[in-house]
Amino acid sequence: MYDQQKFSWKSLWSIKSEYASKVFYLALTFLLMSCTLVIWRPLKMAIFAKMVGAYQVPEAKLYSLLFIIPLILVYSKLVDVLRRHHLLYCYTIFHAVGGMIFAYLLSHPIYGLANTQVSSDRWLGWAFYFFMESFDAFFSATFWSFADSVNNPKDAKNYYGFLVSGSKIGGIVASALLYIILGCCSTSSSIQLLPGALFFGSLMLLAAAFALHLLVTRVPDNIMHGYEATYQLEKHKSRETHTGSGIIGILKSSVEGLIIMVKKPYVLGIFSLVVFYDVMIVIFDWWVAVHADHQLPSVGAMTAFYAKYYFLLNSIGLIISLLGTTPLLRLVGIRFSLFLFPLFCLSMLTITYLFPTADVFFAVLVGLRSFNYAFNHPTREFLYIPTTKDIKFKAKTWTDAFGSRIAKSFGSIFNKALKGASPAFALVSSLSLSFGLVFLWLIVVYFLGKTLQDAITNKRVIGQNGDHPEEAHT
């Protein structure tokens, strides 16, 4: 907490000159990646709904879990052979190329969007959905793993809000352009424009890779160390001879993140936070998606609806990140901040219970996601900073990508189970589950915050053998 004698309002938003370049290039990278995210997410839902069918979304979420697991195994192995920024290069360039390929396929007059037949046999719709799931699943894990590795706890508290603000600016600009363009076009014109929007997202990913290149080449190495105890530990480990390059070694390396997650209560706690949030969001997301599909007849109209949704989400998120995230983290610290989002969820769930209308569900979904992206997510990322590289990259991928898909699969099964139930019973069941998850959430963040504070105070690396204290290095 800030010393009251030295407090000034200006200090809540200041950036030290030596860190300005790092903050700028990280924020720029996140901004460009977020431009792609807010364009591609509306496309994912709209194209799948109008090619395959909105009622196939729960099944698609279940199947995506099986699709994501092999990708996590490959990613975990890449952590061992690539440098931390090279992982982000691979992610952005791979999906940029993939986006260009799908832009070409979706413009095909027979197999693409020009064919307005809705059928579960539209294989291109399924393939596009799974490609988007791979982009979505690794988006957060890949960027934030890198950011967590080049920032120490003080940097994160002071500057993570600015990184989120960058992403929100990118989201606002991209979603607004998409909404305006689609709003001015006829149905036939929008079908031609959507592949172009997908291609534009690919260009933004390539630009993000270039911004990352500027970051690693222009920012001094000493500013990129991150948490010093972890840096010294990994520097020491890099001198050791690694074995196990055979099949067994490769398999062990690929599932090491999962093993760490299961063995370490701290990592399992972070995993539970991901699950609590995503189960709740899937419930709200499903109701909003079905309502939108009933009201909007064309793929262009539904894409415009989700573009408007992401515009509102990012606009509110920008306000929260500028006026709330950075000042609150600097003023009250991480431990108290961890409690704010679950308490906010309790208030949103109460409003939904009292006023269960379609508009309220939409507003609550926007509010939950805005607060999550702008405040809860960077706060949760703080938990990874005093951890080992294997936790930051391997275990984090399992907690974020796999945990999110597990949660979405469970939420989808829950939604499917309530399809034949009365609206009143479905509402009470959904909100009861959500309330229970939030109360568990409050308990978990208490213990996570306590462990985090102990590690930082004692300059300890969480996840090190036995979690023994590290000597202070300068």
Image (cartoon, grey):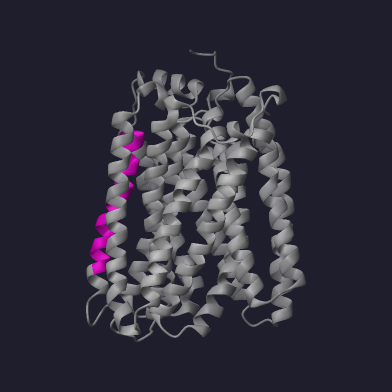
Residue beneath the point at 32% across and 32% down: 216
Quadrant location, the N terminus = top right
Q: Residue at x 60, y 72 (%)?
A: 415
Above or below, 344 against 360 in this view is: above
Where is residue 328 shown, x and y percent of the image? Answer: 64, 39
Q: Nearer the viewer, residue 156 or 327?
A: 327
Q: Is residue 166 left or right of residue 458?
A: left
**436 with respect to 216 (left or right):** right
Decide which of 204, 387 is in the foreground and name it: 204
Examine the rendered structure and indicate whether residue 223 appears above or below residue 301: above
Residue 431 position within the rendered picture, expressed as x and y whole percent measured from the top left? 71, 67
Question: Is 191 located above or below residue 227 in the figure?
Answer: below
| Relative depth, front residue between 184 and 160 | 184
> Is residue 189 in the magenta section?
no
Q: Is residue 52 visible?
A: no
Res. 355 image quadrant: bottom right
Numbered disc total: 0
Residue 462: x and y in percent read: 56, 28
The quadrant where residue 173 appears: bottom left
- Asked whether 98 falls inside the magenta stretch, the response is yes
Q: Is residue 162 visible?
A: yes
**What kind of secondary structure does the magenta stretch mostly adopt?**
helix
**In the rendering, at what x and y percent does residue 379 appear?**
59, 42
- The span shown in magenta is 81-103
Direction from residue 142 to residue 340 in the image, left or right: right
In the picture, residue 247 is in which quadrant?
Answer: top left
Residue shown at 59% from the left, 74% from the top? 287
